[in-house]
Image: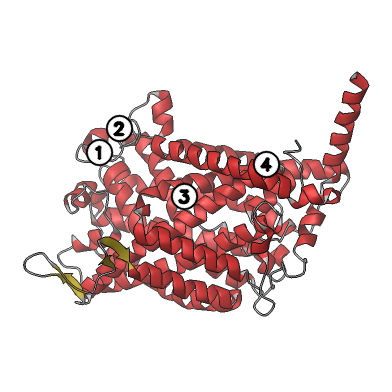
Amino acid sequence: MQLMRRRSIEATIASSDEPERHLKRTLGAWDLVVLGISVVIGAGIFSKAAQVSATQTGPSVVISFVIAGVVCALAALCYAEFASHMPVAGSAYTFSYASMGELLAWIIGWDLILEMFFAAAVVAKAWGLYLDNFLNVFGLGGVDANGVASGIHNTVQVGGVSFDWGTTLLFVVLAALLTAGTKLSTRFTGVLTAIKVAIVLLIIVVGFAFFSASNLSPFVPSAESFGGSNAHSTALTQTLFSFLAGAELSVGGVMGILAGAGTVFFAFIGFDVVATAAEETKDPRRNVPRGILGGLAICTVLYILVSLALSGMATPQQLRDATPDNGASATIVTAFQLQPDAPAWAAQVITVGILVGLTTVVMVLMLGLTRVVFAMSRDGLLPRGMSKTSAKRGTPVLIQVGSAVLLILVTAFFPVDVLGNMVNIGTLSAFVLVSFGVPILRRRRERSGAGYDTEAFRVPWSPVLPIVSGVLCLWLMLQLDVETWLRFLVWLAVGFAIYFLYGYRNSQLAKHPENIAADYREALQESVGVEESRR
């Protein structure tokens, strides 16, 4: 079996011009920056900073954000190089296809579906919770004196089954916008992103107004100080590294900071979605790297400032005492509610900002999800019929509608919020292969005598930086809990079954072997010749 057959860069780019299966180039560098900011700033910063501070790190959550930001920056450089050389939909999946072969490309595409589908579902679920907060803050929902729900609520009972009507409406509206065209949806996202960034800046300013340096001591709390939090104290909920090494549990101290970095990594999820829009970008060699790196840089600075303001507003113990689950549900709103002198409008503004922010996150994740499925379908690893695009709008309507329906069914009836770390592990696995793929592709292009676009973006100090990026991503994967790893293995098993039962035989490379990379064909012919001579 030719499991590692690779498609050449030339064939990869040529595939984007296939009639009825190509996307329109309508996006510029600023559009991509907006996409990056809109998807990165969302549920992570509004919830993960407070949650991790309360249950794992204390004020040193700032360091966790710095670590996660550095790892993402290194991975972003690798994404920028690949996207600049291969401006085709599919992101890490497409890049891996050209550098490491079909099987690994399938695995990474399957992981990207995991990342974006569950990220969209988890964030939409959070959107529904904040919709209830929004209704409560503005007096439209709540409970009466007897504790019975009154007014408007996101969740309603239908035949004894809970149904989230708000998230359903959200997916319908966003799917309609994405189907109408990428440029239109980007403009809509841009307006909401401007509102979201303004509110984040307001959170930082108001937060520092209630900043107390005494709340930063101790900056790195001991594990014992988290006695009231048991979120990471069992064999399945501690990190895989702690489990394998027999180290202390992943709360407090250095282990808590590292584990916290693996958790707050969720806040950075999505910058790689920008790479999935490369096929819809004008002058992608220049604009895609700018969009990826520019958006990530802005978000990282904002994250560090928000986490620092949060740490100065409330101690980990205060956050745990203010929530019914020892800090597991703490958010930035919790920190503001602990300030007796905070203006009454602060909670309202923050709630609006969170709701707007989560809307853009879900929208861009849906965009990324459909583009990955589109690329895999166009390559034949998934049914080819799904990849047909609208002649008028240039968008894969069938995939967008189908993914929206699946997201509605999953988020409306299932508790997907427990799968947040599945998003992290799927993303990090993609980062690992993209990072290691940069030096591999360069070396293979040099050996085959094929050119490598010298005008496109290139990662500096390669292969050192790409290798460091890959190792750090692997390290963050080890900081995820054992339960997440077990779920990930089940997901991979399902993916392997689909590939061997369908994808391998229906791949476009199986039907058009002339598109296989020349150096792979030569190596295959050479190995066949050696085998025949032995016989």
Q: How many numbered discs sit on the rendered protein?
A: 4
Position of residue 153 relative to residue 225, above or below, is below
Q: CA distance from mark 1 to mark 2?
A: 8 Å
Question: At 72% from the left edge and 38% from the top edge, which residue is drawn?
Answer: 3
Question: Element at badge 1?
Answer: loop
Choose between 228 and 129: the one closer to the eye.
Answer: 129
Instruction: Name the residue tied to disc 2.
Output: 234
Instruction: Name the residue tied to disc 4.
Output: 103
Q: Is residue 510 left or right of residue 122?
A: right
Instruction: Name the residue tied to disc 1.
Output: 230
Disc with the residue nearer the chain's start (4 vs 2):
4
- Judged by depth in the image, the label closer to the viewer, 4 or 2, is 4
Q: CA distance from mark 3 to mark 1?
A: 22 Å
- In the rendered view of the protein, which quadrant contains the N terminus? top right
The answer to the question of whether label 1 and label 4 lie on touching residues, with beta carbons closer than 8 A, is: no
Q: CA distance from mark 1 to mark 4?
A: 40 Å
Circle 2: residue type = Thr
Circle 4: residue type = Leu
- Judged by depth in the image, the label closer to the viewer, 3 or 1, is 3
Q: CA distance from mark 4 to mark 3?
A: 21 Å
Question: Element at badge 4?
Answer: helix
Choose between 313 and 89: the one closer to the eye.
Answer: 89
The disc placed on residue 423 is: 3
The image shows residue 342 at horizontal and vertical percentages of 20, 68
Circle 3: residue type = Val
The answer to the question of whether label 1 and label 2 lie on touching residues, with beta carbons closer than 8 A, is: yes
Disc with the residue nearer the chain's start (1 vs 4):
4
